[in-house]
Structures are given as structure tokens and as C-alpha cells.
């Protein structure tokens, strides 16, 4: 049976345009149909935590707006003209030409057009991101490839302690700004200097620092692995792959110890911090114990319908730190089959000797059908998307939107990472439970 | 028989059918005069920003038919608009007290290999899976750029499945690259309904087809229509397949938006004899009066209409005078689709606001009944010197224009435009509700909205003082339309 997609929970490769926008003062130039941009930023931007156009996103994004004539005769001249005028009209520091389906099928030689501008010294790269090539997770990787292969230069020296932080896909994860900020904070507390590429304050300066780093840190089950491997091949920078986004005390402690060990930092430096933050965390958990144990209609099990990063991170936290039991977890980021076994293995040990059954699918409708047919012996708890609110109401469950699309929440710098992040998540889940019947 | 052909499965796009423009700058007198005469030549741009495509408008309309579903024959990204579509769908369902459900747009998920080997089997399989999952009363298949380029025979897939499923299986051709006018997607959706759903009348009823979006004013409309002895049926959103089958039985069709209603209204008139009310739209006072009078004449209810108008005008007169006093001397720029844009320019003038410029996202030189939009004609009659422009929501032109004109207000429709005025310290209002200035109640509400927007501009002022616009100083010093090529 064909893999149909009912209720989209990711978009197509061209969605990588938002990864360009996530780099300060960078702008994508689309060589695509007129509606691609709007559909994509609508889904993973505006309707996903209320992430609007910001400095130069949304309808500011230059686009050749492909016409029938372009599809028949090709449109490299039009692209050339659009890029040339983008430099005149738009005030930005870095540009990335991304193609849509029309250009990729017709076979416009976009590289040829962009190389002319690169030869003039313009900060511009290109990637062929026609939507039929896959998900925006892949699109994000294609943008990173383009930056690594076409823009980065070897550094004169390595700066000890400087760490490039690669984690969630910007915009697809509505909490991404908070995630990168908190990961940066955690690294700072153990004496490292994070180089945060995505988010406010990074920009071209952060891009230019990438090859000076002591190592690349990848916090993600699979996305970004291609990039850190490439950076190692091309620039000799080693990488640490930590597959779990750390939420709450158990995983955050593990994360800090692993990073410190990899970076050659003395354990004492880490243990003091962990102790202090765990005390902080448990001060609040102790105080909330009545709510966690004595509220009416408490869930005992949970289900995630999320991309692999969140399905895994939430499951680890809820099992290791909150005493909940995992039902089947639904991983919806369209992971290629050959990458599924590795991701699956991360779900085998969620803590306390518990693992979870996992279904990989991009078909949200199928997931809902399956959940609707299953038996619940306690209040169902669904950590999913705004699509799942209808399902939760049908099965008399509680839901919290954490994975795209999160159209029912406004998100600024909130994230679930680390110690305070764990507290935020407990707040959000139990607030949903308490508000549900009141 | 008119210009609309509902036996073919595809409708031509607005550029070829209605002489639609996306590049023009001039006066409303010139635009109107030349549209009625030998026509206006469209101008292209040498720089453009991402706009929107017809597939969004098309599947947004079709997917909100309650018991139908949409299969989007495309890569997954083309169904990304189902997310915003779902938010809009739920908002309207809440307004109308309907069940809490999700919108149903299912992607065939076209991939690399499909562009080489074809995807007819995938489409067939998706339709069968979707049918098994939801048991809809109709399935619409929306096309995409990839589909359009690989050129498959969609119709034969649907024909093959027909005996098996026994529900209408209807294609809707809305490939993004085929039109710069996203409203072509409305036509694709309405064409699918006319071509594949509407049946010849079994009887005539006292229904009025009301073409609109989410129908927030439906109670007021039902009450007014009751005075005329008729009942509204709102479409396409939140209608049922059965209701749509019987559109041919209505006494007349009216529309809240000339852009939205032209094709279905004229199609029903030309093929099923249901008259379409072709006046300005019922926004503000004169628009509402002309519209209601036209409907009253069709129904032979002139006396009731005049009575209603006299009572309502008297009722709102004191409040309207107060609003006009408060808005006197205020200036505005309008940026909307052409029907709303030209109608709301008139509405703002009715409120005493001085409209400096009316930008519309496209312009139809004629509607499907062969005439220039009535709203444009009326504007030209009142003030032929009014400055107008046409662009497919090109923000760089709008930002440049606002920077030059510095109006008190920017009144807009469509997401992603109002924010730029706000970032420039200009009070802005985005119309999210198509009934924002509907009739006598609407104009009072709308006037109050504008007064509120002007009363406290703290967000706009403070945001403007903190942000940098994404445009070069060079661009902000150019003429707003200097990157339009050629002449009209």
C-alpha cells in the first residue's frame, strides 16, 4: 500500500527555507511555484507556535513564482534577474537559493546561475530542494550540505572549548529557539563556549566560526548526522552524537556527563552543577506532589505522536522521571527505512527497564485510527499536535500539542530542555489535565 | 448559453478567461476605462516575492464541504496548507456550532520515483484508502505542479474507480504554475462542483445560494431573508454534498465577494437558470442597498426591501454620524483582493476616511458575465483619479508605498500584509471575517474597529521604533512600482 499522508506533520524538502531564515539576517531565494513558500511557512511557521515572518520571512522571501512559460522553456534567466535584484532590494547578509518541484523536474541549471554570483564573492549558496525529494527534515540537511560544501572555509586555528550546536530543525520544532538557547546555557555552565548557528545573535558570524570549533555536538536521533559527518570529513572536526534531547534531571545529567567526558572536562566541574540544578528541580516537584498524585482523572500511560526527537525525549523523561508508562509511540518525521533501526534502538531503554513499541509513519490519520481502536485503562494522555485535539476529545483524553503543527499555542523562548525545561513540561502536561475538566 | 463550459473537466485560469492582471499602476478611471475598452496589458516584474497559488484556494474550499474529502495528488508540501485550513475550518465550525472535527486533505505523497514512473497507481490506492477511512459522500482530487508536468490522465483513474465507489469522484485542476492569480483556485473548486456535483433541478425552492467563506453573519442574513420569503444556503464551506447537488433549485445566487462568486454564480445562471446578483457586494451602505434591491427585484419583494432599508438606515444614523465625526480627515491605504479592495475603498469613503491608494492582489478586467466588476465601475464614477495598483501581494511594493504615503491606516485582507504596516508605526486592520462591514450592522462595527485601531497605536509605535525593515535604503527611495516592466 502506498504511504499516504493524512494530516501533515512535516512538510516537503523546500521547507528547508525556514532553516535559512533561522540564521540571523539570512534569506532564502525560492526558484519555485508562487504558492510553495506560503504553504510551507504557514504550516511550520505561523501555524506552529505562532512563528511569523520575523525580519525577512513570509511574503518578504524572494521567489521567481514559476509560470507555465517557465516550466516549458526553463527560467534560469529569470532566476538570475531575481537574485541580482534581491541584492539590491533586500538588506541581508547571507542568501540561499532553494528550488521547488518545477525547477527540479524541468532541470534548470541553478548551480550554474549561482556559481556566477559566488565567483563575484557574494555570500550565496544553492540547494535543489524540489518537494518530491522528501521531508523538510531532509531539506534542512540539504541546506546544511550547501553551507558546508559551498560556503565554509577551513579555519586558521581551532578554538579550544568552542562547540557547534546542532539539534532540532528550526521552525518544524516550535520550541527551537528555546532549545538552542538552553543547550547553549548547559554547555556554558560546564565551561564550554557554544556556537549557536540558529537563532537570534548567530548570523554569518556564527557560520564563519563553524570550522574553528573544537567539536560538533549533535543532539538529535538522526537529523544532522550527515552534516556533522561531512564537517569531520571536510574540516577534520570531530563530533559527538548524543541522540536524546535532554529533558529533566535524569537525561540532562547523563547529557552533561557525556559532553564533559568528550570535551575532556573534569567530572567535579560537572557534578557540582548537576547537584545544584537537581535540587532546584526537585524543590518544585516535591511541592507539586499532590497534583502529580492526587488530581482527579490522572493518566498513568502516555502516547506520543511526534517527530523522533520529541517522541524519544518525552518518552525518556516521562518514564525515567515521572513514573508513567509508555504505550505505543508514533514517530512521524518520515525517517528513511534504513535509518529506522537505529532510531528504534533508542526506544528500547527508556529507563526503569522499560521500552516502547514504535510505529514509524507520516500518516496521522492512520495513527488516529489505531489509537481510536485501542483500549485505555486510565485517562489517555496524548502528546501530539493540534490535529490530535479532536482525537483526544473523542476518546475523552488529555492532549498537549508539542509537535508540528502546534497551531493552538504561542511559543516564544519556552523549551522543555534541561532542568527548567523539565519543569515547564510538567507544568504544561498537568495544567492540561487540570484544565480539562474544570 | 454563456461563456462557461461545465462539460469539460477543467476551467481556464483567470488570466485567459477574465483578462486578469497582476501588474498595473494607474488610476481607477484608467483601469476601468481600458478594461471596458480594448483592455489593459499586464506588466511583469523583474523582482518578485513569494505570493500564493491557486491550489490553496481550491482545496481550502473543497475540503470544507462537510461530508466530502480532498485528495491532493502532490508531494507532501502541497498539503501543508491543510494546517492553516484546519485552523480556519475549526474557527468557522465554532462560529456555526458544528461538530468539532479536522479538515480532510490527504496527500498522495508523490516522490522522486513517481516523477519518473508515474503515479496513477498511487492515486488509485490513496483514493481507496481514504474512502475506507472516512466513507465520504464525494472525493475531489486536486492537482499539483508535479502532476501538471508529468502529465498523467487523472480522469481515467477516476473513471475506473467510479463503479467501485459509487460517489462523485471529481478532479480539480489547480496547478500552481498555471496562474499567478490564486483566485483561479476558487474557480477550479467551483468548477469541480458545477461539473461533478450539481444536478438539474428537481423542483424550485425558496432557497438563495449565498457564496461566502465562514458565514459569521448567517443569523442576521436568515432573519433579513425571512422578510423576503427566502432562506439562505451558505456555500461552499460547511455545506453538504446533498445541498450542493441542489444548488440548481435556488431562486438566486448572491456572493459576499465578487472574486469568489463570479464563476459559480454565473455558472449556475448560464447552465441552470439560477439568476446571479451582479451588483457591488453588500459591504457598507450603498453596496448593501444596491445588492438587496437587486435581490428584492428578482424576488418581486421591492416593497419589503425598501421598508427594511428605511428602518435600518434610521436605526443606525446617529451612531454612523458619531463614527464619521471621529474618522473625519483620517487617511488610509487599502491592500486586498480586488472585490474586497474596491468595495472597501467605497466603504471607507462612506465612513469619511480619505483613501489615498487602493492596491489589489489582482484585477479581473471582466467577470464571467462579461462585464467589468460593478465595484470598480462605481469607484470610477465617483472619483476617477483614485490611485490604484495591482500586484500579487508584493510586499516590497506595499512597504515602499506605505513609507511614501504614511497613511493613518492600512486596511488589508490576506495574512502577512498588516504586520508590515504595524512595523512602520501605521495602524492596520486585517479583515479576517468576510462580513466585517456587512450591511448596516457591519459598517457600524467596522467603523468602531477602525476607531479602536487609531485610538491606541502603542504596539505599532513601539515595534516600529525597535525594528529594521528588511529592505535596502536604495529600495525605499525608489518609486514603489519601478520594478514593473513595460507599460500597461
Image: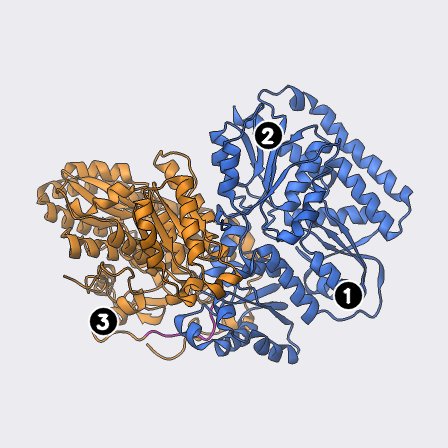
Chain given the colour orange: B
- Quadrant location of residue A430? top right
Query: The disc numbered 1 marks a residue on which chain?
Result: A
Badge 2 element: helix
> Mark 1 sits on what residue?
A233
Say which residue appears at 77% left-offset and 36% top-offset: A250
Q: Is residue A401 left or right of residue B351?
A: right
Q: Nearer the viewer, residue B292 or A171?
A: A171
Badge 1 element: helix
Residue A65 x %, y %: 45, 68
In the figure, the shade used to draw chain A is blue
**Separation of residues labelled 3 and 2 (CA atoms):** 62 Å
User: Which numbered disc covers residue A431?
Assistant: 2
**Residue segment shown in magenta:** B42-49
Q: How would you classify the magenta stretch by its main secondary structure?
A: loop
> Mark 3 sits on what residue?
B33
Q: Is residue B327 magenta?
A: no
Say which residue appears at 42% left-offset and 75% top-offset: A72
Q: Is residue B45 magenta?
A: yes
Q: Is residue B75 left or right of residue A287?
A: left
Amino acid at each position: 500500500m502506498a504511504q499516504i499522508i493524512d494530516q501533515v506533520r512535516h512538510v516537503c524538502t523546500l521547507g528547508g527555507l525556514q532553516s535559512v531564515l533561522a540564521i540571523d539576517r539570512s534569506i532564502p531565494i525560492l526558484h519555485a511555484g508562487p504558492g510553495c513558500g506560503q504553504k510551507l511557512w504557514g504550516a511550520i511557521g505561523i501555524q506552529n507556535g505562532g512563528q511569523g515572518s520575523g525580519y525577512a520571512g513570509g511574503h518578504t522571501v524572494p521567489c521567481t513564482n514559476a509560470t507555465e512559460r517557465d516550466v516549458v522553456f526553463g527560467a534560469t534567466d529569470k532566476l538570475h534577474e531575481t537574485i541580482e535584484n534581491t541584492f539590491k532590494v533586500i538588506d541581508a547578509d547571507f542568501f540561499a537559493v532553494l528550488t521547488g518541484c518545477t525547477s527540479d523536474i524541468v532541470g534548470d541549471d541553478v548551480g550554474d546561475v549561482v556559481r556566477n554570483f559566488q565567483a563575484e564573492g557574494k555570500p550565496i549558496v544553492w540547494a535543489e530542494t524540489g518537494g518530491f525529494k522528501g521531508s523538510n527534515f531532509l531539506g534542512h540537511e540539504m541546506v546544511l550540505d550547501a553551507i558546508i560544501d559551498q560556503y565554509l572555509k577551513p579555519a586558521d586555528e581551532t578554538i579550544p572549548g568552542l562547540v557547534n550546536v546542532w539539534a532540532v530543525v528550526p521552525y518544524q520544532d516550535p520550541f527551537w529557539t528555546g532549545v538552542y538557547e538552553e543547550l547553549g546555557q548547559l554547555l556554558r555552565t560546564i565551561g564550554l563556549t557554544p556556537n549557536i548557528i540558529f537563532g537570534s545573535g548567530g548570523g554569518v558570524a556564527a557560520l564563519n566560526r563553524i570550522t574553528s570549533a573544537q567539536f560538533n555536538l549533535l543532539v538529535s536521533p538522526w537529523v544532522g548526522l550527515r552534516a556533522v559527518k561531512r564537517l569531520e570529513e571536510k574540516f577534520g572536526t570531530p563530533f559527538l552524537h548524543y541522540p536524546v534531547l535532554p529533558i529533566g534531571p535524569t537525561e540532562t545529567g547523563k547529557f552533561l556527563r557525556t559532553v564533559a567526558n568528550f570535551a575532556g572536562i573534569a567530572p567535579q566541574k560537572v557534578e557540582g552543577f548537576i547537584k545544584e540544578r537537581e535540587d532546584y528541580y526537585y524543590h518544585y516537584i516535591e511541592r507539586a506532589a499532590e497534583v502529580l498524585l492526587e488530581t482527579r482523572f490522572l493518566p498513568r500511560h502516555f502516547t506520543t505522536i511526534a517527530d523522533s526527537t520529541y517522541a524519544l525525549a518525552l518518552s525518556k523523561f516521562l518514564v525515567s522521571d515521572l513514573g508513567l508508562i509508555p504505550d505505543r509511540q508514533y514517530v512521524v518525521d518520515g525517517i528513511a527505512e534504513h535509518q529506522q533501526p537505529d532510531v528504534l534502538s533508542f526506544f528500547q531503554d527508556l529507563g526503569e527497564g522499560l521500552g516502547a513499541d514504535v510505529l514509524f509513519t507520516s500518516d496521522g490519520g492512520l495513527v488516529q485510527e489505531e489509537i481510536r481502536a485501542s483500549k485505555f485503562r486510565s485517562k489517555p494522555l496524548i502528546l501530539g499536535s493540534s490535529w490530535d485535539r479532536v482525537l483526544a476529545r473523542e476518546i475523552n483524553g488529555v492532549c498537549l500539542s508539542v509537535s508540528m503543527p502546534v497551531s493552538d499555542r504561542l511559543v516564544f523562548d519556552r523549551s522543555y530542555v534541561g532542568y527548567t525545561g523539565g519543569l515547564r513540561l510538567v507544568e504544561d502536561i498537568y495544567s492540561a489535565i487540570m484544565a480539562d475538566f474544570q | 448559453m454563456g461563456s462557461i463550459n461545465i462539460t469539460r473537466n477543467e476551467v481556464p485560469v483567470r488570466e485567459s478567461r477574465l483578462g486578469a492582471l497582476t501588474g498595473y499602476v494607474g488610476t481607477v478611471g484608467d483601469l476601468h476605462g481600458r478594461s471596458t475598452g480594448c483592455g489593459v496589458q499586464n506588466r511583469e516584474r523583474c523582482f518578485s516575492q513569494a505570493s500564493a497559488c491557486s491550489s490553496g484556494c481550491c482545496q481550502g474550499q473543497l475540503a470544507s464541504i462537510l461530508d466530502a474529502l480532498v485528495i491532493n495528488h502532490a508531494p507532501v508540501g502541497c498539503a501543508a496548507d491543510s494546517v492553516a485550513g484546519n485552523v480556519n475550518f475549526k474557527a468557522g465550525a465554532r462560529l456555526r456550532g458544528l461538530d468539532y472535527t479536522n479538515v480532510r486533505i490527504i496527500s498522495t505523497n508523490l516522490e522522486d520515483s513517481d516523477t519518473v514512473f508515474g503515479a496513477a497507481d498511487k492515486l488509485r490506492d490513496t483514493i481507496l484508502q481514504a474512502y475506507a477511512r472516512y466513507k465520504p459522500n464525494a472525493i475531489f482530487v486536486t492537482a499539483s505542479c508535479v502532476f501538471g508536468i508529468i502529465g498523467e490522465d487523472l480522469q481515467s483513474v477516476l473513471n475506473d474507480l467510479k463503479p467501485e465507489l459509487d460517489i462523485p469522484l471529481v478532479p480539480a485542476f489547480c496547478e500552481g504554475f498555471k496562474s499567478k492569480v490564486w483566485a483561479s483556485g476558487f474557480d477550479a473548486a467551483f468548477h469541480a462542483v458545477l461539473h461533478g456535483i450539481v444536478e438539474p433541478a428537481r423542483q424550485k425552492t425558496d432557497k438563495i445560494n449565498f457564496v461566502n467563506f465562514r458565514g459569521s453573519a448567517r443569523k442576521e442574513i436568515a432573519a433579513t431573508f425571512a422578510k423576503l420569503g427566502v432562506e439562505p444556503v451558505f456555500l461552499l464551506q460547511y455545506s453538504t454534498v446533498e445541498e450542493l447537488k441542489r444548488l440548481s433549485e435556488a431562486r438566486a445566487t448572491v456572493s459576499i465577494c465578487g472574486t469568489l462568486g463570479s464563476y459559480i454564480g454565473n455558472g449556475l445562471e448560464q447552465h441552470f437558470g439560477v439568476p446571479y446578483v451582479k451588483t457591488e457586494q453588500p459591504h457598507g451602505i450603498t453596496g448593501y442597498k444596491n445588492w438587496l434591491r437587486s435581490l428584492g427585484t428578482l424576488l418581486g419583494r421591492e416593497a419589503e426591501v425598501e421598508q427594511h432599508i428605511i428602518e435600518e438606515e434610521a436605526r443606525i444614523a446617529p451612531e454612523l454620524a458619531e463614527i464619521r465625526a471621529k474618522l473625519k480627515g483620517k487617511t488610509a491605504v487599502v491592500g486586498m483582493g480586488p472585490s474586497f479592495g474596491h468595495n472597501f475603498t467605497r466603504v471607507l469613503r462612506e465612513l469619511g476616511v480619505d483613501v489615498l491608494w487602493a492596491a489589489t492582489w489582482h484585477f479581473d478586467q471582466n467577470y464571467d458575465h462579461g462585464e467589468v466588476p460593478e465595484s470598480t465601475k462605481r469607484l470610477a464614477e465617483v472619483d476617477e483619479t483614485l490611485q490604484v495598483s495591482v500586484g500579487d501581494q508584493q510586499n516590497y511594493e506595499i512597504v515602499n508605498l506605505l513609507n511614501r504615503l504614511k497613511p493613518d491606516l492600512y486596511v488589508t485582507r490576506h495574512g502577512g500584509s498588516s504586520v508590515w504596516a504595524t512595523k512602520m508605526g501605521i495602524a492596520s486592520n486585517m479583515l479576517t471575517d468576510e462580513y466585517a462591514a456587512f450591511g448596516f450592522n457591519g459598517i457600524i462595527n467596522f467603523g468602531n474597529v477602525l476607531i479602536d485601531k487609531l485610538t491606541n497605536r502603542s504596539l505599532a509605535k513601539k515595534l516600529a521604533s525597535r525594528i529594521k525593515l528588511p529592505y535596502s535604503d536604495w529600495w525605499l527611495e525608489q518609486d514603489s512600482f519601478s520594478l514593473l516592466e513595460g507599460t500597461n
